[in-house]
Amino acid sequence: MRKVVFIGWRGMVGSVLMERMLAEKDFSGFEPVFATTSQIGQAGPDIGMDTPPLKDAFDLEMLKTMDIIVTCQGSDYTKKMYPLLRKSGWKGFWLDAASALRMENSSVIILDPVNRTVIDQALAKGKKDFIGGNCTVSLMLMGVSALFRKGYIEWLTSMTYQAASGAGAKNMRELVSQMDMIGRASEEFLKDPESDIADLDQRVLETMNHRNFPIQNFGAPLAGSLIPWIDSPMENGQTREEWKGAAETNKILQTRTMIPVDGICVRIGAMRCHSQALTIKLTKDIPVDEIMGLISESNEWVKVIPNTKEDTLKYLSPANVTGTLGIPVGRIRKLNLGKEYLTLFTVGDQLLWGAAEPIRRMLTILLEHLSS
Ligand code: HSE
């Protein structure tokens, strides 16, 4: 039986992966092994079957016995262990949620509802490294890849509204702590509906800018505010998150000529859904109805939301999408800039289609490939 080791299964992406694998009854037909960087010998997760005690995730000899390594441990682990494994002659499949290997020639960025052909071609060629994409890019492509496929996109700009989870578990806690502190500081004004709104506003502002306000992880207030900077600076003025837009989109789709993708990535006070407003320069004047049809038929998770206030409020929000695989795409209309300028808004769970789900599905594809 094929052996698959899971590393980083306790973290945020890893635990969502475990949940999804359990929900889909994926733990069958292979021998699962769980490894850890810190709790060797302890019991593994409850997956409804016996598994051996946790192995050492840094044990090269153990890793070399695996057919597939699935890691959600992060880029530092990848940078340390991947080269050692390949140097040792290990020929197994490396399936990784971290970004470290994404842009390597030997890697395929996986998002099978969008690039299954690319994945199948890579498997046929003997490629072994399959890496999950940046969450914002994956969620954008789940929404509009049909328009790329048709050659309808000359360029695209994405203005993002990214959730705290993209920055990590500590950041999610920090966001809620910030909300809590603002809520408690405002209580006396909220209890009295007659209180002066200017006083409430002033109290919120003072609280957010107080030296005790918890900003250790974000570096700035997020609750009641926003942070238009995600990841590290690039030399050209982009942030690395913004740079990934074009680099990864074109790699996922294996475009022949680079389609420009750029925008500003902004952190907002949502918990785990990334949203984005796209402006698309179409290659020609394509009717909105045709665009809606293409989008809604592109995969089973995307849903076109009518451009009404009622539908937008009901469906097109993190509050509605969190914890689901749904990819609503709404506010679809031509901009007044001209008939070739399209705008739309889309939302997706950053931990599901943005991280764990492409990995879960790729594991199934790899196991099928190995048994064929
Ligand atoms: N880099 C993303 C973010 C998450 O900070 O929201 C991972 O793709």
Image (cartoon, rainbow, N blue to C red):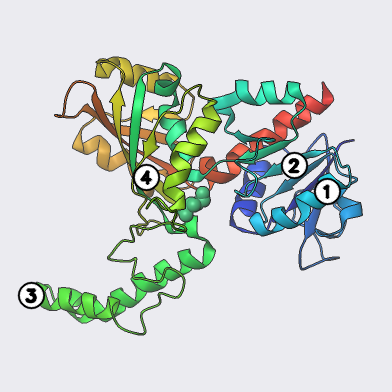
- Residue at image location 29% in from the left, 75% down from the top: 182
Q: Quadrant of residue 20?
A: top right
| Residue 280 vertical placement versus 72 (above, below) | above
Residues at badges 1 and 2 in contact (C-beta under 8 Å)? yes
Quarter of the image with the N terminus is top right
| Residue 15 vertical placement versus 148 (above, below) | below
**Label 3 sits on residue:** 194
* SS at badge 4: strand
Q: Residues within 10 Å of mark 4 (few under 14, many from 20)?
A: many
Compared across the picture, whether 89 is left or right of 212 comes to right
The amino acid type found where label 4 is placed reads: Ser
Q: Residues within 10 Å of mark 1 (few under 14, many from 20)?
A: some
Q: Quadrant of residue 29?
A: top right
- Residue at image location 34% in from the left, 32% down from the top: 156
**Label 2 sits on residue:** 94
Q: Earlier in the sequence, mark 4 or mark 2?
A: 2
**Mark 3 → mark 2, Cα distance in angstroms:** 61 Å
The amino acid type found where label 3 is placed reads: Glu
- Residue at image location 49% in from the left, 59% down from the top: 167
Q: Residues within 10 Å of mark 2 (few under 14, many from 20)?
A: many
Give 192 or 142, whichever is nearer the viewer: 142
Mark carried by residue 85: 1
* SS at badge 2: strand
**Mark 1 → mark 3, Cα distance in angstroms:** 67 Å
Mark carried by residue 275: 4
The amino acid type found where label 1 is placed reads: Leu
**Mark 4 → mark 2, Cα distance in angstroms:** 30 Å
The amino acid type found where label 2 is placed reads: Trp
**Mark 1 → mark 2, Cα distance in angstroms:** 10 Å
